Amino acid sequence: MPNRCIKEGDNPDLTKERKTCTFDTDELTANLYGSRNNMERRREITKKISADPDFADPIPHDFLSREKCIEATAKKTKAVVQRGSEFCDVTNYYEMLHLINEAIGIGGYPLALHYGMFLPALEGQAEKELTDDIIPRAKNLEVIGAYAQTEMGHGTNLRELETTATYDKATQEFIINTPTRSAMKWWPGNLGKMSNYAVVTCQLFIDGRKIGPHNFLVQLRCEKTHEPLPGIIVGDIGPKMAFDTNDNGFLALDNIRVPRKNMLMKHAKVSPDGVYTPPMHAKLNYGTMVYVRAHMLYAHGQFLATAAIVATRYSAVRRQGRIEHGVPEVQILDYQTQQHRIFPQIARAYAIIFTYMDIKDQYDAMIKGIAEGQTDLLPDLHAITSGLKSVVTHMAGLGIEQCRMACGGHGYSDASGLPKLYGVQIGGCTYEGENMVMLQQTARYLMKAVASALQGKPLSHSVAYFGKKSSGKSRIGKEGGDIAREHEAMLEALEHAACRLSVEASQMWEKRGRGGETKERAWNGVTVEMNRAARVHTRVFMARSFHRRVTSSPPSIRPVLTDLLSLYLHYECVDMAHHLLEDGFCSGEQIRYLKSRLYEDLTTLRPNAVSLVDSFDQSDRELNSVLGRRDGNVYEALYQWARKSELNYTDVLPAVQKYVMPMMEENRSKL
Ligand SMILES: CCCCCCCCCCCCCCCCC/C=C/C(=O)SCCNC(=O)CCNC(=O)[C@H](O)C(C)(C)COP(=O)(O)OP(=O)(O)OC[C@H]1O[C@@H](n2cnc3c(N)ncnc32)[C@H](O)[C@@H]1OP(=O)(O)O
Ligand SMILES: Cc1cc2nc3c(=O)[nH]c(=O)nc-3n(C[C@H](O)[C@H](O)[C@H](O)COP(=O)(O)OP(=O)(O)OC[C@H]3O[C@@H](n4cnc5c(N)ncnc54)[C@H](O)[C@@H]3O)c2cc1C
């Protein structure tokens, strides 16, 4: 069966791996990206960018200062903007995303938040009077914007943000002010140096009454000189763990006046005479965050895929140690521990991307509903995207770190691309709402679902399984080798665990309430359990999505995807075995059975491991990893990469000449 990556001159071990492929890698790639045409388009973009001198990096960014990296990234951004249509359909979201990844990389660029949040916020929340003026100019990039919500003192708890927007009826303006040091906006991406406008989240005050957080469009810099406008202090917050090429910024506003129409008023409104009309759903103002949380799944699935590609290919190329005496050193991918470290990451990357596809469909349906005046899909989508954002970012972070360690010493080098990848990816656990906080949003929803299920009320999409009758005992290991029934038995077991944990958390909460605690204090006493229930529920949702995609996949790729799904479900069940055992739903014998099946899965997947990661179809540019390169010629590339280090420009470093040599000389003369 064809693995389409084989080329002459490649590392022979990688070629050997590709020859054992049992499916058509192009079929799987096309399935992952929606169609064969989408796959071809991605490849065309990659090919054109790779050959274009505007996007060449003579010195890898690993060896440049932050300022130089920002300059190089800004230059490439300008080229993408001016020449984008030479490479792709610039109106196609996924083509643009791929172009940006190929041309610029993942560490941030001047327009990241402009496209990622500023424009979506205006499009989703502003009304015509404002959008007619600002959106054409923003699309034309006369206006570049950031999404400035988080403050130095508050990010998670939006209700306590301190920046104020006070309505002045006399002039029909809002006065926007930063009253304290902790009220300074702090963290927003591209706010520091790149943006000349921002959507700023402020507490709305009318006639002395605090109404709550709302968004306002504020001009920050002169459109001609790019200097900050009077009353505006803006700058970069300094170096961070990663995202080196993003100017996350600070902002203070000194009683800045903006016209009434600058409030984003598609949902909540303030009339000229100061009458406030609330939105049709109280949290529609938070819509941009739901949008980003949904889309983060795709990015984080791809981040994990990158790490899995690097670790798998490198493990096929590297030979070290022997499994039996008297035979040559083995590829490290033959070690069971290595497979157990890496293969679940491959499966999880597929699971995340497939889950994203389901969520995207739900998101589109919700937006259509809102346009028709219906918000009934929003609570379910908010609850599940809050859980998914948290589980997926955490899962991807752990997975990338496993892949990095699986590459041994070279994984610790920036040459592997993995330290930077981890730094960028792990930020997702924090931004768009810290994970522990967002899981509580899911848990709140589960508590309502428990109540509805007990009362026999209808249940919405993500919690529909709460209405199923549990069989009391798991069918795991009792399906006589029927793989479809075995998968169903594992899904049923996970659903049982999520439901049980939710019911138990609800009972614990109630009990504390009966003991005299307020509802809120009682909640804080059970949040660890609440978040546990939310995580298991979210993992059930992912497992169901993965299962649905596999069972509806084309026959040519279904066998390999079924193997991958088996590994995924066995791994998830073993990882959550304590939840399955706690109430006796599963026995110890059943968990031992799951483990033995998992080890069989590792062996089954071994011949297809490289081909499964090849099917993610990430180019060498996207991987940005000496260890993960398609041709597997790792060692020579590693040496050439190290040669580019600034420390190697001279044989004797000035620092050595200045301090170390005189010290050695002094010591020598003492003898
Ligand atoms: C063609 C060009 C293409 C170019 C390519 C572009 C690529 C774009 C890709 C997209 C990816 C972009 C990447 C960008 C990088 C991101 C950088 C980071 C940005 C940020 O971090 S922005 C700041 C984010 N901040 C947060 O997320 C804050 C978190 N906090 C909150 O959201 C809230 O404070 C809260 C939800 C935790 C609590 O809110 P609140 O106190 O007001 O509410 P309650 O907890 O009391 O809940 C009351 C009820 O409201 C419901 N609720 C809450 N939120 C929502 C919501 N969003 N939607 C619906 N319902 C909501 C609760 O569930 C409660 O319901 P109940 O029924 O009463 O129980
Ligand atoms: C790379 C990056 C990019 C960002 N980009 C932007 C941007 O473009 N625009 C923007 O506005 N912001 C941005 N942010 C800010 C980000 O949205 C916030 O940092 C994030 O929402 C977390 O809020 P916080 O910093 O207030 O954390 P905190 O809430 O202070 O969290 C600290 C700890 O307190 C815990 N905690 C807080 N509240 C609770 C609770 N109710 N229950 C239990 N535990 C709790 C948390 O779990 C965490 O352990 C960015 C941040 C990063 C790291």
Image (cartoon, rainbow, N blue to C red):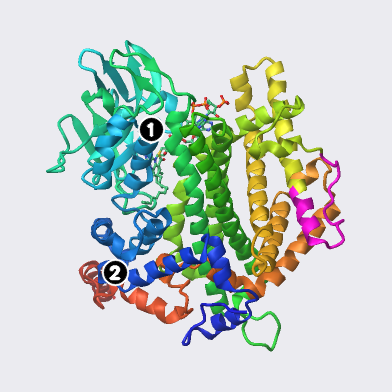
Which type of secondary structure does the marked residue at label 2 adopt? Answer: loop
Specify the amino acid type for callout 2.
Asp
Seen at 67% across and 53% down, the residue is: 548
Check disc 2: other Cα within 10 Å, few if <14, some if 14-19, many if 20+. few
Distance, label 1 to label 2, CA atoms, is 39 Å
Task: Provide the residue designation for mark 2.
Answer: 57
For badge 1, the amino acid type reads: Gln
Q: Which quadrant of the figure has residue 604?
A: bottom right
In the image, taking residue 565 as reference, residue 383 lies left or right, namely: left
Q: Position of residue 339 (x, y in %)?
A: 64, 68
- Nearer-the-camera pick, 377 or 398: 377
Residue 81 placement, left or right of 212: left
Along the line of sight, the residue nearer the viewer: 257 or 44? 44
Check the image and report above or below for 11 versus 271: below
**Which x, y percent locates residue 539?**
64, 47
Instruction: Kindly identify which numbered label has been placed on residue 125.
Output: 1
Give the extent of the magenta segment: 470-491
Q: Residue at x 15, y 31 (%)?
A: 230
Determine whether the residue tagged by mark 1 lies in a helix, strand or loop.
helix
Q: Residue furthest top?
A: 207
